[in-house]
Image (cartoon, helix red, strand yellow):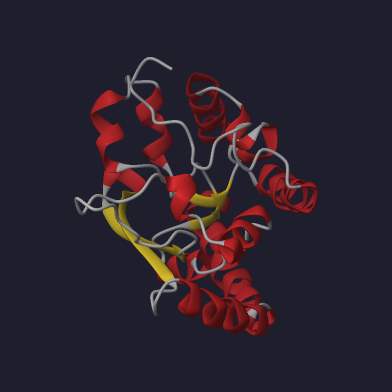
């Protein structure tokens, strides 16, 4: 009953409350990133959701679009803006995803929505992560976030799918705040972005 009905009700209510509570922060970050990114404060990208159906995820844009002399984007570390570093470290870049939750594309709690090209690389067990809606935070995020291997991350995602409950979601919800406050596992040491999944790691 929880996963079929009450989870969606709670998602809608808490995402709406979250947007209202964080609206002052939302506006400030929007303005600062608009300045830093030449009027482009948001990042949009297609991601697979429940049952591998695609939706457009929205996040605050932490990297600019600067290119080299040949027209190629500069490395991520060279495009990460100063305000972007702060926004990413404090996880403020995730706030716009509350809009995705309101729309029903995502849940507050669930496996993180990953890149479309990963779909063909999953084994049958790993594909189970798409049996539920993706989330802003999840079981993998409070158990290592970006500091664990892809294999371990997928194991945690599937474990969550198999054990989904109100108490588990409540645990993840509160532990996420602790992780964010400590800025744990935002990126692997020395990396700006998460290591690319190639099907073997």
- Expressed as whole percent of the image width and height from the top left, the position of residue 45 reads 32, 57
Which residue: 49% across, 64% down?
97
- Expressed as whole percent of the image width and height from the top left, the position of residue 125 reads 39, 21
Residue 112 visible within the image: yes
Which residue is the extreme one toward the front? 69
In the rendered view, would you say 16 is above or below 101? Answer: below
In the rendered view, would you say 44 is above or below 32? Answer: above
- Expressed as whole percent of the image width and height from the top left, the position of residue 181 reads 79, 53
In the rendered view, would you say 37 is above or below 169? Answer: below
Which residue: 60% across, 25% down?
148
User: Would residue 134 appear left or right of 17 to someone viewing this image?
Assistant: left
Q: Quadrant of residue 37?
A: bottom left
User: Would residue 151 appear left or right of 165 to someone viewing this image?
Assistant: left
Q: In terms of depth relative to the viewer, which is nearer, 56 or 195?
A: 195
Q: In terms of depth relative to the viewer, which is nearer, 60 or 159?
A: 60
Which residue is the extreme one toward the top? 200
């Amino acid at each position: 009953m929880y996963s079929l009905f009450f989870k969606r009700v709670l998602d809608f209510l808490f995402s709406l409350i979250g947007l209202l509570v964080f609206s002052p922060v939302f506006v400030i970050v929007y303005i600062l990133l608009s300045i830093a990114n030449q009027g482009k404060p948001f990042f949009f990208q297609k991601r697979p959701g429940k049952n591998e159906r695609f939706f457009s995820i929205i996040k605050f844009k932490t990297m600019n679009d600067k290119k080299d002399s040949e027209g190629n984007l500069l490395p991520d570390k060279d495009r990460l803006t100063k305000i972007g570093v702060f926004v990413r470290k404090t996880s403020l870049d995730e706030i716009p995803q509350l809009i995705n939750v309101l729309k029903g594309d995502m849940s507050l709690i669930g496996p993180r929505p990953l890149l479309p090209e990963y779909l063909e690389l999953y084994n049958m067990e790993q594909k189970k992560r798409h049996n539920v809606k993706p989330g802003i935070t999840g079981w993998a995020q409070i158990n290592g976030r970006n500091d664990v291997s892809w294999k371990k991350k997928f194991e945690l995602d599937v474990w969550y799918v198999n054990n989904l409950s109100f108490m588990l979601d409540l645990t993840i919800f509160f532990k996420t705040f602790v992780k964010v406050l400590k800025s744990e596992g935002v990126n692997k040491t020395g990396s700006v972005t998460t290591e690319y999944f190639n099907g073997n790691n």
